[in-house]
Amino acid sequence: MYSGLSYCIVGSGFSGSVLAERIASVLNKKVLVVEKRSHIGGNSFSDIDQATGIEIHKYGSHIFHTSNTTVWDYICKFGEFSNYQHKVMALFKQRIYQMPINLKTINDFFNKNLSPNEAIDFLNKEISSCGITNPKNLEEKAISSVGLNLYNAFIKGYTRKQWGKDPASLSADIISRLPVRFNYNANYFNDPYQGIPLDGYGQLFDRLLSHRNIELRLNTSYEEMAQYIPPDCMIIYTGMIDRLFDYKFGALEWRSLNFEWETKNLSDYQGTSVVNYSDESVPFTRIHEFKHYHPERTESFHAPQTVISREYPIAWQQGAEAFYPVNDTYNNERFNKYLYKAKRKSNLIVTGRLGLYKYWDMDTAIENALKLFERLKKSEIP
Ligand code: UDP
């Protein structure tokens, strides 16, 4: 039994690590962090590839971006960020375009030389011919933003691969993540704060969890530890909520990913960090080339080798890594049943992207962890 233990945090992604750091350093309480994987950081984890010296994002590209000054100020205390600005290319029918859709994409795709106002008029005609006034799903939302031709080229096939579903059955929120621009701004994100940790996400998480009040147990599931946790200890659970309740109401649906890794004997494979593959006939959705995240690391950046990974979306099965929640009515209703059960336990808080079944970016996970901590501090919880 861990006597004197006040908090046990399950999971060491951003939600778990930020809460552990705050509780340990501000409340001066002992925290046990239990992580079933062999590393900290959840899906944001990055590490050096020993053969090439290139920092790789083990679970696909993670670019930190936020508009929230509190989040930015907080996370910058644990590591310096580069001024990397994410720009993505999309390959469709053997031609390369800028993504998200901007004036360059529109001009290249329609083989035109439109000014911003001309492009707005041009796309408005495309959009109005589709007759969608009140978009109710991803397909309608996308068509009513860019018209049928651009939708068919850059969104339909990619989305069908990504989600394994018809875009008409998916929430419009998913596509609202992507801006549409009538200028030549090629940034993937609109947020004013953006970058990559200069010494990697792995180091950032090491610092978050370095407080003497924090004990970390890797390769350990919550189920293994539960018997050693004192009954008055608060459990903050950031794992999958259905697993916590032994899938009592059935497993929640997730989308998972397979990464196919390759080291190429080339200094530069694709000229940028991410290329999306829009054609449905190509089985993967994107290729990541990680050295482009660290041009400031001149040795690995100019090395004669490069590490790439092809991203293949797959259906989630028990035991696989969960990446994207399938937030349809059916799954959200089941999730609410789990949440109701969790809320009835006085020493349990479920949070995080996995726990709350939310399609959150890293900054939203941090924002929610900081807010939850403030409530804990004021003893609003339990
Ligand atoms: N999407 C698309 N084409 C693209 C990129 C994205 O249709 O080239 C759609 C797709 O439905 C995806 C959503 O936009 O699920 C959000 O994309 P984002 O890049 O934000 O997803 P993430 O980086 O979280 O995988």
Image (cartoon, rainbow, N blue to C red):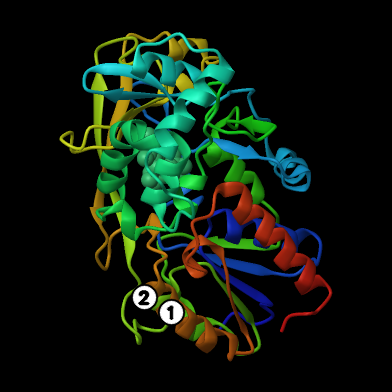
Q: Position of residue 65 (x, y in %)?
A: 61, 37
**Type of amino acid under label 2:** Tyr
For residue 10, say whether it is visible: yes
CB atoms at circles 1 and 2 under 8 Å apart? yes
Q: Secondary structure at mark 1?
A: helix
- Please name whichever residue, 106 or 215, is drawn nearer the observer in this view of the structure: 106
Residue where numbered disc 1 is placed? 333
Q: Residues within 10 Å of mark 1 (few under 14, many from 20)?
A: few
Q: Is residue 162 left or right of residue 334?
A: left
Q: Position of residue 219 (x, y in %)?
A: 40, 61
- Please name whichever residue, 381 or 156, is drawn nearer the observer in this view of the structure: 156
Could you tell me which residue is drawn at 38 percent across and 14 percent down? Answer: 108
Could you tell me which residue is drawn at 38 percent across and 10 percent down? Answer: 303
For residue 54, say whether it is visible: no
Q: Secondary structure at mark 2?
A: helix
Residue where numbered disc 2 is placed? 330
**Type of amino acid under label 1:** Glu
